[in-house]
């Protein structure tokens, strides 16, 4: 079945739980989902795509238990409905080719699928073909990261993209003039998707993709900017490692954070002695720009593992 079809998990519930359920799905490792909203007071439908029926069944059970817990807290969940079905690859691609159009982001960025022949003189065009990997620029968290990167990334900088998904943020960094970009994702299918998109954008000489996350092989005190479009719990888990990858005065761009989590995240960054320079927001989501000065060091040194860069 691999490479031939995907499995769709469809979840219908009361619109009042949209934010809570969306956050829960991301915390379960669903990098992205399709949200079909309706009129106020009507049910909403989430569609999540995975690669196997075993994944779909596991997710369905978790969602059912989560909605039950909300109901026990007197949250109006409504008559939820969870359905699982197979989606053939050609049907998936036909769906996206019908609905995905060029998307402007920030001041000069255009995200479009490779099959779209429209020209955009004077714009920075990123070609992304949507697959199972999260990141077509259509989710608020991705756009927030892109807008901050457009503002922050300078020529010849080194950029780390943690949880690269489709590779869109790594591609943007390369097009903004970065000299080297390291893109990490623990999902091998996402990593392969990123490599395909990186090749389509002709930045494979700049962007290196690795399957995994920050580990001992990741250079320390090497990157000017690290971008992590994840979710709060994962950012908290990786934050110390993220900081160790940065040069003195390096910057972290952190997104996938809900507006309701603002106080918790701000307090966390303060405890970590990271200076919050900006918080941008869109559609209930936040993006933090944080800077941490490494004490007692006026320059950085590459460790033995990073010399090959």
Image (tube, rainbow, N blue to C red):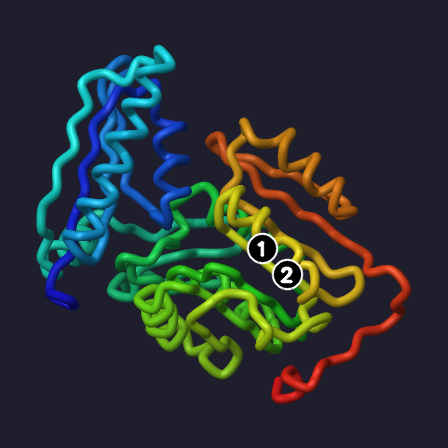
State the SS at label 2: helix
Q: Position of residue 287 (x, y in %)?
A: 58, 42
Query: In the image, which disc is placed on residue 205?
Result: none
Q: Quadrant of residue 76?
A: top left
Q: CA distance from mark 2 to mark 1?
A: 5 Å
Compared with residue 229, is residue 167 higher up or lower down, i.e. above or below? Answer: below
Are discs 2 and 1 less than 8 Å apart at CB?
yes
Q: Residue at x 29, y 51 (%)?
A: 101
Does residue 214 appear left or right of residue 3 in this picture?
A: right
Q: Residue at x 67, y 75 (%)?
A: 156
Q: Quadrant of residue 85?
A: top left
Q: Nearer the viewer, residue 219 or 94?
A: 219
Q: Position of residue 71 (x, y in %)?
A: 31, 16
Does residue 119 appear left or right of residue 142 in this picture?
A: left
Q: Nearer the viewer, residue 164 or 40?
A: 164
Compared with residue 237, is residue 188 higher up or lower down, i.e. above or below? Answer: below
Q: Residue at x 34, y 47 (%)?
A: 30
Crowding at dot 2, Cα within 10 Å, few <14 / some 14-19 / many 20+, comes out as some
Please give the residue where the numbered disc 1 appears in the rendered image: 238
Task: State the quadrant of the N terminus.
Answer: bottom left
Does residue 263 appear left or right of residue 69 in this picture?
A: right
Does residue 213 appear left or right of residue 3 in this picture?
A: right
Compared with residue 110, is residue 82 higher up or lower down, i.e. above or below? Answer: above
Task: State the quadrant of the C terminus.
Answer: bottom right
Query: In the image, which disc is placed on residue 241?
Result: 2
Q: Nearer the viewer, residue 10 or 238?
A: 238
């Amino acid at each position: 079945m691999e490479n031939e079809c995907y499995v769709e998990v469809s979840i219908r519930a009361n619109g009042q739980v949209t934010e809570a359920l969306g956050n829960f799905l991301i915390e379960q490792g669903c990098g992205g989902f399709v949200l079909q909203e309706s009129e106020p007071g009507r049910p909403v439908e989430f569609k999540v795509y995975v690669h196997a029926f075993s994944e779909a069944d596991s997710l369905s059970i978790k969602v059912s238990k989560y909605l039950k817990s909300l109901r026990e807290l007197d949250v109006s969940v409504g008559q939820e409905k969870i359905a699982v079905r197979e989606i053939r690859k050609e049907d998936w691609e036909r769906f996206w080719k019908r609905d995905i159009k060029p998307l402007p982001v920030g001041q000069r960025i255009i995200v479009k699928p490779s099959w779209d022949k429209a020209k955009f003189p004077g714009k920075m065009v990123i070609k992304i073909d949507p697959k199972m990997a999260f990141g077509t620029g259509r989710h608020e968290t991705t756009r927030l990261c892109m807008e901050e990167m457009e503002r922050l990334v300078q020529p010849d900088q080194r950029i780390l993209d943690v949880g690269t998904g489709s590779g869109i943020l790594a591609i943007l960094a390369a097009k903004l003039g970065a000299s080297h970009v390291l893109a990490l994702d623990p999902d091998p299918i996402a990593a392969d998707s990123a490599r395909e998109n990186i090749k389509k954008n002709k930045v494979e000489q700049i962007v290196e993709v690795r399957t995994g996350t920050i580990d001992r092989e990741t250079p320390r005190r090497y990157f000017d900017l690290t971008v992590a479009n994840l979710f709060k719990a994962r950012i908290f888990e990786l934050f110390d490692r993220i900081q160790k990858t940065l040069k003195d005065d390096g910057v972290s761009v952190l997104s996938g954070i809900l507006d309701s989590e603002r106080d918790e995240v701000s307090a966390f960054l303060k405890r970590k002695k990271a200076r919050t320079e900006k918080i941008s927001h869109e559609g209930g989501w936040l993006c933090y720009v944080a800077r941490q000065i490494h004490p007692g060091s006026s320059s950085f040194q590459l460790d033995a593992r990073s010399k090959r860069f």
